[in-house]
Amino acid sequence: MDILGVEGPSLCSYTDLAEFASPSGEKIAKLGYSDCGATANWQTGVSIVDVKLGKEYNGFFGLDGKPENLKVLWTSDMELTFSDFPIGKLLWFSQDYMSGVKVKIETSMVHKQIQPMPNNGSAD
């Protein structure tokens, strides 16, 4: 943590869970979660590392809580897809085109999660 230019201990801990290499191995998606204490829930995040440049890009995707059933899949060397998570847990979703990777949410999962409740047929 950096307060007024003075480096101090972080209040949050971060746990790396998994790494997913792109088909060529030139990029790595890193999945993990942070824990900032008893008054905050875990937050899951994904960062992308450009292996050749040694640069890490953050802030692509965030979920409230631990990732549980989240799937992270490289569909090509330049496209990463997230699926199998409750859409209501999504905290942020962003693109960083400097990373050279397009990230997306699997649309079949999104539509399944946000469909309206069926009408029971009664007219009030």
Image (tube, rainbow, N blue to C red):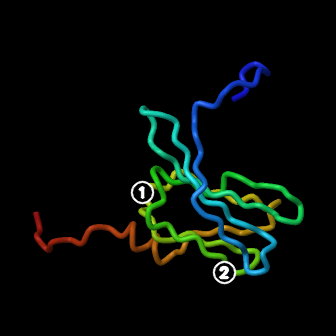
Other residues around mark 1 within 10 Å, as few (<14) / some (14–19) / many (≥20): few
Residue 42 in percent (x, y) is at 48, 45
Amino acid marked by disc 2:
Thr
Residue 6 in percent (x, y) is at 77, 20
The relative height of residue 46 versus residue 102 in the rendered view (above or below) is above
| Residue under pointer 1 | 88
**Residue occupying image coordinates x 77% and y 69%:** 27
- Element under disc 2: strand
* Left or right of residue 74: residue 122: left
Amino acid marked by disc 1:
Gly
Q: Residue 57's image quarter?
A: bottom right
Q: Residue 54's image quarter?
A: bottom right
- Element under disc 1: helix
Distance from Cα at disc 2 to Cα at disc 1: 24 Å
Q: Which of the numbered marks, if any, corresponds to residue 3?
A: none
* Residue occupying the far right of the picture: 53
**Residue occupying image coordinates x 79% and y 80%:** 24
| Residue under pointer 2 | 75
State which quarter of the image contains the N terminus. Answer: top right
Q: Earlier in the sequence, mark 2 or mark 1?
A: 2
Q: Residue 55's image quarter?
A: bottom right
* Left or right of residue 32: residue 47: right
**Residue occupying image coordinates x 76% and y 19%:** 4
In the foreground, 80 or 117: 80
* Left or right of residue 5: residue 39: left
Residue 8 in percent (x, y) is at 70, 24
The relative height of residue 59 versus residue 118 in the rendered view (above or below) is above
